[in-house]
Image: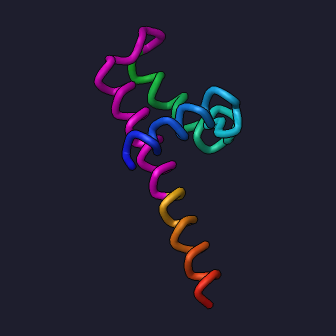
Amino acid sequence: MEEKLKELYMQEIEQFQLDFECNPEYRAYYTQVEALWEGKDMPPAVFHLLDTSNFLSFAHGFRLGARLAGWVRAG
């Protein structure tokens, strides 16, 4: 299941259906994080942390949606 969720996540990112950059709040926080390194690339570990947290948010939303769909069908 985890691999399928990762595939779906990447598919959504690649097709621009899940675009964090277009969210003003996300963009504001990301800009603040980038400023910590004063124009240099952020460390790979920080970038990986951000990417992982984005994936976890996607996976949680997907699972919640699946549970809600099951609840609607059952009710």
Give percent across and percent down for residue 64: 51, 66
Residue at image position (56%, 76%) is 70
Residue at image position (39%, 49%) is 1
Give percent across and percent down for residue 24: 68, 41
Q: Main secondary structure of the magenta part?
A: helix
Residue at image position (70%, 31%) is 16
Q: For residue 43, which quarter of the picture?
A: top left
In the rendered image, the quadrant that contains the C terminus is bottom right
Q: Which span of residues is magenta-colored? A: 38-60
Above/below status of 37 relative to 54: above
Query: Furthest residue to the left?
Result: 45
Q: Is residue 52 magenta?
A: yes
Q: For residue 40, which quarter of the picture?
A: top left
Query: Furthest residue to the bottom?
Result: 75
Residue at image position (33%, 18%) is 44
Position of 12 with respect to 48 (left or right) is right
Position of 42 with respect to 32 (left or right) is left
Above/below status of 27 relative to 67: above
- Nearer-the-camera pick, 45 or 32: 45
